[in-house]
Amino acid sequence: MIILGVVLLVIGYVAGIPILGTIGVILLLIGLALWVLGSIGHQVGGRRHYF
């Protein structure tokens, strides 16, 4: 999800499409939050780790 967010952010910036940039930032933040929660030991969606 983090990689997809970065890709959409870059595509939105290069192509000049602001909605792709916004979606990219949202996916990036969600991916980072899930990664942090998984790395400190909280279960995310019934899983101990989120990859």
Image (tube, rainbow, N blue to C red):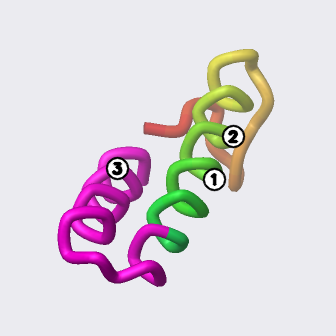
Magenta span: 1-21
User: How far is mark 3 from mark 1, CA to CA?
Assistant: 12 Å
Foreground: disc 2 or disc 3: 3
Q: Name the residue under label 3.
A: 6
Numbered badge on residue 33: 2
Point out the residue furthest to the top here. 40
Q: Do the residues labelled 1 and 2 touch (CB within 8 Å)?
A: yes
Residue shown at the point (42%, 46%) measured from the top left:
2
Q: Mark 1 points at which residue?
A: 30
Q: Looking at the picture, which amino acid does disc 1 mark?
A: Ile
Residue 51 appears left or right of 34: left
Q: Which of 9 and 51 is in front in this view?
A: 9
Point out the residue furthest to the right here. 42
Q: Is residue 49 above or below residue 24?
A: above
Residue shown at the point (59%, 33%) measured from the top left:
35
Please tell me which of labels 3 and 1 falls first in the chain: 3
Q: Which of 44 and 10 is in front in this view?
A: 10
Quadrant in the rendering for residue 15: bottom left
Q: Are marks 2 and 3 in contact (CB under 8 Å)?
A: no
Q: Is mark 3 on a helix, strand or loop?
A: helix
Is 14 in the magenta? yes
Q: On the rendered image, what quadrant is the C terminus found in?
A: top left
